[in-house]
Image (cartoon, rainbow, N blue to C red):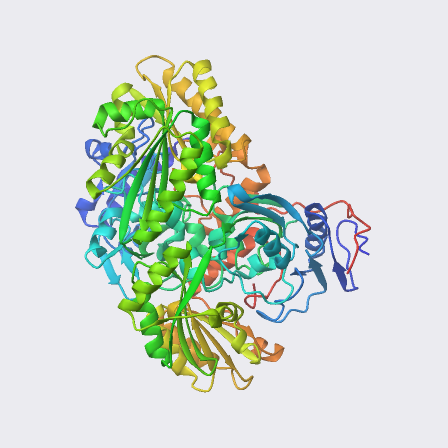
Amino acid sequence: MSVDRDTLARRAEIAAALRRILPACSVIDDPVALAPYESDALTAYRQPPMLVALPSSTAEVAAVLAYCHAKNVKVVPRGAGTSLSGGAIGLADGVTLGLAKLNRILQIDLENRCVVAQPGVTNLAISDAVAASGFYYAPDPSSQLACTIGGNVAENSGGVHCLKYGLTTNNVLGAEVVLMTGEIVRLGGAYLDPDGYDLLGTMVGSEGLLGVVTEVTVRILPKPANVRAMLIGFPTIEAAGECVARVIAQGIIPAGMEMMDRACVHAAENFVHAGYPLDVEALLIAELDGPVVEIDRGIERIESIARNLGATCCYISNSEEERLKFWAGRKAAFPAVACIAPDYYCMDGTIPRRRLPAVLNRIAQMSKQYGLQVVNVFHAGDGNLHPLILFDANNPGELETAERFGDAILKLCVEMGGVLTGEHGVGIEKRDLMPVMFSETDLDQQMRLKCAFDGKHLLNPGKVFPNLKRCAELGRMHVHHGRMRFPDLPRF
Amino acid sequence: MVECAFPICLVSDMTDFSPASAEEIAEIVKVAATNREPLEILGNGTKRGIGRPMSMPHRLSTARLDGIVLYEPEELILSVKAGTPLSQVEALLAEHNQHLAFEPPNWGNQTIGGVVAAGYSGPRRIHAGAIRDHLLGFTAINGRGEIFKAGGRVVKNVTGYDLSKLMAGSFGTLAVLSDVTLKVLPKPESRTTLFRRGQSAHDGIKLLNKALGLPFEMTGAAWTPDFNGTSLTALRLEGFADSVADRAVALTRILDVEIGDAEFDTFWDQIREVAPLQPASVLWRISVPPSRGAEILDILPGADAIADWGGGLIWLGMADEGDCGASALRTAVKETGGHATLIRASDECRLRIAPFQSQTTAHFALTKRVKESFDPLHILNPGRMYANL
């Protein structure tokens, strides 16, 4: 996107105006202090914002947005900056709106099993706040210690437990949203189903392009009485993939079902010494929760399915310590991979479960073709792949090769009946691939929705859409010249 | 038949369109848009009584878009054309021991498109989610006569805006659905009902919410004033047979409830269909925080009521008189949080009071812009949900 020189020329004026809206210390314009905002967790891309504003209330958020709307200044909302798709990367001519100061839990309503939190509260802090009462918040992205609930809403974050408990969208009941104009809209609350159109459902996963969430009501669940995990090794990827498909098809929905390929198992084992078997081609972790009988029955059935498919080992956790050990390697998979290669690029496609072996074989072929090694780790239960492409950014051209390889993997996911991104978002990373999945008409309809929320395209522009068309152009009606193509349509 | 040439022509006769493909729908909508002549969008028309009464010059039914596009039981997904009857979908799923977990009310010969457009879910919604949570993707025709799709055929998908959420419950005012892809789930192999008789609504709802705060994964929590002669507070457990049995016994130790027998087999279907209130000439559907449900029952003492979702969903049936209870209910709901929707009443009543609750100025302005982003000329079901929309 080209930088708006006019806005840049007004930088000092905009900073001064923001300092009239916010306490002076809540506006950052010093280049050194702006540096932490230059990227998110997709660190291959960097762009320091023109300015950073750090409001601490809904009123301040509304005032900043209203000002920017009036003055045509672009705004990038930001939580903890843990996006893996570049959703929170700054704009050279835009204000990054950091929501970290809105960090209070406003209400814990155990009777109605929900929590009202400001957007800067971390995902884990919500579970911590209700843990003593026996509740928790189910979606658990691996960044949950750092990532914020506002960011979770923007990205529709998942996690290992979303197989059974759903993504953010299935666990959010309400939100207070500030539109780019500064108008405040409350959607939903401590009750189910929307009043009118499900605008809240549309806000979730909209990657900060539709509005700024200043308050979220999430559903909390009673903590399961017991949790046990299984560690199952397979001699082939095919057998492991088939095991996942059969478990799900039989009606067993484990709390989580994760798979790692041989390369990943080795990397993880070397890193944390979790006791993983090294002589397997695929390792499956299945977690079951609930009453003891429920878990026992699930374990019996999964073990039987796995044995029939030639599983070479099947361990069942007998203590909380052992369960955490099973998970240790999986949870450390990304840092473990970082130890075996200078850089890695994490992909996030979803495919129909039964396509798992076929897709993995194709990725292995591509790995040879592109000359870069791949390590595979995935949320197998819902077909969400995270191939990690290993490369060395110091070698000229290797990042570009990794990106091309990544694009090829995502195109393969779509070809196999899947989608470009399962939980990381489109951001800037997959923006240019959107036409692989959507026609121009499909994208036009989505952009028109964007226009309904943000008619000037000031909120997080440059993300999600490869070519964000102007609203006036999108609004034009093409008059129907011809006659009906189906003159013999039957009537009833 | 419509014989139209640019720039405009008027179609004076009332026309009922029954297209058999998305392309045919698109053509009809294009012509309607060119002529600025609105269309009433229907499946089989079983829910025409919901919302504001319509008197459109033309009707477009999707009933002929009928058939299964793709069913992969092992992937737990089903793609069907919008006009496929719900009963056909449920029969097909039952052959594979699967079901639509959101338990849509089975009101007459509904099409699946109509079920999605209305967005109503049954007792299991508290556990399995609503239809919005099971609609993975769709193809539809917007008010410009363009065929577009959104979502996909996998559960975990954040590619582009989640337009499926918008389609569920939009009553055909945004787009005409032609295909929907749904997440399906295996039927639980066993179920049981825990119950207590003779409780007031207040005590019953209190009991239900105490139960829902326990880690026993209840898939139903309802109260009704009359089941076989007494009021009934009921909880449903589903899953593996021995797990259900085990959880049922454990719950009887914590709560003052009994384990039910076959007598209760029909109970949950009755709640799902809102069967006890079917004779009422006025029917309200009220969503509130569960702990506030009992307060709603006190508002109109003469009304018949049932409470589902642990008190979070109140159905009220009453006689068609005065303002049908609208002002009292909406005042109460403002206090508790939530919304009250008029599901059934005379045309006259549905014109007099707004069936869908009014929204704040900023919220409604956004609703209107969203409507116009799909249907700029207000061709599709205009006025169905709100006057001027």
Position of the N terminus of chain A by quadrant = top left
Q: Is residue B168 left or right of residue A76?
A: right
Residue A383 in sight in this render:
no
Q: Is residue A343 left or right of residue B287?
A: left
Q: Is residue A6 left or right of residue B73?
A: left
Residue B44, given in percent of the width and then of the height, sits at 67, 62
Quadrant of res A88: top left
Residue B26, given in percent of the width and then of the height, sits at 68, 48
B289 vs B40, nearest the viewer: B289
Quadrant of res B327: bottom left
Q: Residue at x 44, y 53 (%)?
A: A201
Q: Is residue B214 above or below residue A149?
A: below
Q: Is residue A207 above or below residue B121?
A: above
A209 vs A267, nearest the viewer: A267
A364 vs A317, nearest the viewer: A317
Q: Residue at x 45, y 76 (%)?
A: B306
Quadrant of res A349: top left
Position of the C terminus of chain A by quadrant = bottom right
